Amino acid sequence: MVAVIVGVIVLLIGGGLLFYGRRTQAKTNLLQSVATSTAADLPNLMSGEMVELKGTIRCPNPLTAEYADRLCVWYSSQVSREYEHREKDSDGNWETRRQSESVSSNTQKTSFFVQDATGQVEVHLEGADIDAPTILDRFEDKSSSNSGPSIKIGGVSISTGGDDKTLGYRYNVKALAVDTPIYVLGVYQEDGTVGAPPPGSKTRKFIVSHRTEEELHASWKKQAMWLAVVAIVLAVAGAALIVGGLISLVV
C-alpha cells in the first residue's frame, strides 16, 4: 500500500513538472512568433497587439537601489541573517548548523522608456515578469563583534531574537539599471505605451529582461526540455511503483 501512495505522489510531482515545462515552452514559442518592432512602428499597430522591443533603458526620474546606490527603474533587495544554530541530533549529541533567515525585503518599480534608433516607447511595469541581474551580493561578517542578533535598517536597529550566534548579514540586490540594454515583450496599450495584457489572458505575456531574445530562447528551451525529461522519468517510476504495489496487495 505504501508503494501505491508513493507512486501516486511521484506521478503528481511529474505532472506538475510537465505542466510547468509546457508553460515554459509556450513562452519560448511566443518569443519566436512576435516580430521585433521599433518605436516608429508602434503608432501603426492596434491596441492589444503583442509587441517586442529591444533598446536601452531611459528614465528621467529613476529610483536608487538601496544598498547598491545605483540608478534603476526596478529593484528587489533582500537582507538575510546567517547564523549558527545548535541542536541535538537523533542520538542526543549536539551539532552546529549554519542557517539563514530573511530579515527584510523590498521591491520598487517605476515607468521607463525603451529607446532605439527611431525613438522612445514608454513601458509600465505593473504585472511584468521581471528578469533582472544581481548587482550586489555582499556578506558582512559580524561574528567577531557579535553582541546578539540585530541589524540596522534605515537607521533603526532591529533585534531578530534568539540565542543563536550571528555570523553576519548578506545583502542581495537585483535591478534593471538605467542606460543598460533591455528586452520587452508586452501588449501595446491604447495610450501608446506598452504593458501587461488584460487580466485572464492566457496567450499573451508581459516579460521585461536584461537578457537578449536569443539568450532567453536558449535558456527557456533547455529548461523546458529538462523538465519534460524529468517528468517522463517520474511518470514511469510512479507507474511502476503503483503497479508493483497493487501486485503485492493481490499476492
Image: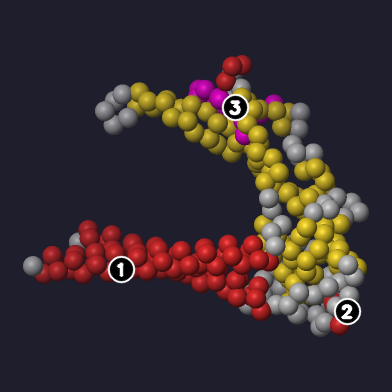
Badge 2: few (under 14), some or many (20 or more) residues near its Cα, within 10 Å? few
Residue at mark 3: 168
Q: How many marks?
A: 3
Quarter where residue 121 is shown:
bottom right
Residue at mark 2: 43
Q: Residue at x 37, y 25 (%)?
A: 95
Q: Residue at x 61, y 24 (%)?
A: 141
Residue type at the position of mark 1:
Val
Decide: marks 2, 3 in contact (CB < 8 A)? Answer: no
Q: Which of 84/21 is in front? A: 21
Where disc 3 sits, the SS reads strand
Residue 87 drawn in magenta: no
Task: Inspect this view and state whether residue 191 appears.
Answer: no
**As drawn, 44 above or below 211:** below
Label placed on residue 236 = 1
Q: Which of 249/31 is in front? A: 31
| CA–CA distance in space, label 1 to label 2 | 52 Å
Q: Which of 21/153 is in front? A: 21
| Coloring applied to the structure | secondary structure
The residue stretch that appears in magenta: 157-170
